Image (spheres, rainbow, N blue to C red):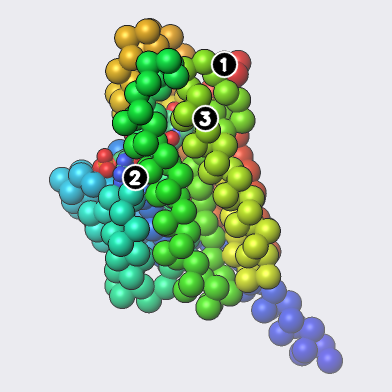
Amino acid sequence: MQIQSLQCLQERNVLTMPNIQGKVVIITGASSGIGEATAKELASKGAKLVLAARREDRLKKLQEEIQNKRGQAIYKVTDVTSYEQVEELAQYALKEFGKIDVLVNNAGIMPHSFLYKKKVDDWNRMIDVNIKGVLYGIAAVLPSMRERKEGHIINVSSVAGHVVGAGSTVYAATKFAVRAISEGLRKEEIGNNIRSTIISPGAVATELTNSVTDPDLKPSIDEIYKGAIDADSIARAIAFAIEQPSDVAINEMIIRPTRQER
Ligand SMILES: NC(=O)c1ccc[n+]([C@@H]2O[C@H](COP(=O)([O-])OP(=O)(O)OC[C@H]3O[C@@H](n4cnc5c(N)ncnc54)[C@H](OP(=O)(O)O)[C@@H]3O)[C@@H](O)[C@H]2O)c1
């Protein structure tokens, strides 16, 4: 009887032992900003990384940097607006590492503008990258996670997924959608032991604001981003969510600069 209890305890310890070591993590948008910082953070904690984005030179450089510090990383050039390419990314991870523990759906763009300016191409691109890209990622990793009855999908939303500002309407719509998708995913996959996490950053110093070309908005955005925090802050939050015991799901985190009001 005592031996049985000990075994139970040991099994629970294995199940709930906090760790990142050895976990296979796909990160989209790994070529800069939050994705890149997350890759470095997780690599330093022993994750096996599959880096994805469109800029191969950046991915290659990041892979080399991680490998030079004895971390493990492979990469695949991927445009998340292509369902086929995202599916190939997941298959590549499975072929190289045999499993997918975590997907960080991080790729995103933010070409803010006022609606009356009718920047329809920008609206379409945001919908394609920020919403469809996230859905394609989920679709690509779910089958193997459901089969293993284990997995974790982390979707990067935004404070703009909680608050809509003038000029950020379409971007906010995509980030509200990311939160809706994440919550639906959470409810649908509870029975398959698949965790879902929404990460909602405030202003973070990355290349994201480069896509804002509207001269009427650029000054106010530059002002907000004067107080931006480092991408490492978000990387640490993502690592925290991953390293929780598998029976604990961090479902959402909002991470703002302390001085950010909205
Ligand atoms: N920075 C902030 O203040 C902030 C705040 C809230 C939320 N976020 C969210 O955080 C996420 C990361 O953004 P970031 O701030 O780190 O900006 P970033 O430095 O511009 O990074 C964006 C990443 O997305 C990738 N990407 C863009 N389009 C893609 C596509 N079609 N296919 C594959 N990858 C694509 C980019 O890589 P390639 O160009 O090489 O493809 C890049 O690696 C985004 O979802 C963003 O909305 C950021």
Q: Earlier in the sequence, mark 1 or mark 3?
A: 3
Q: Which residue is mark 3?
A: 172
Tell whether circle 3 marks a residue whose Cβ is less than 8 angstroms from ligand 1.
no
* Residue 52 in sight from this viewpoint: no
Expressed as whole percent of the image width and height from the top left, the position of residue 216 reads 37, 8
Q: Which residue is mark 2?
A: 29
Tell whether circle 1 marks a residue whose Cβ is less than 8 angstroms from ligand 1.
no
Q: Please tell me which residue lies in front, 195 or 80.
A: 80
Q: Is residue 160 left or right of residue 67?
A: right
Q: Which residue is mark 1?
A: 259
| Residue drawn at (56%, 29%) of the image | 159
Depicted 118 relative to depicted 144: above or below: above
CA–CA distance in space, label 1 to label 2 = 27 Å
Question: Which amino acid lies under the numbered mark 3 shown in the image of this protein?
Answer: Ala
Question: Which amino acid lies under the numbered mark 1 shown in the image of this protein?
Answer: Arg
Tell whether circle 2 marks a residue whose Cβ is less than 8 angstroms from ligand 1.
yes
CA–CA distance in space, label 1 to label 3 = 21 Å
| Residue drawn at (79%, 84%) of the image | 5
Q: Residue furthest right?
A: 1
Expressed as whole percent of the image width and height from the top left, the position of residue 90 reads 36, 65
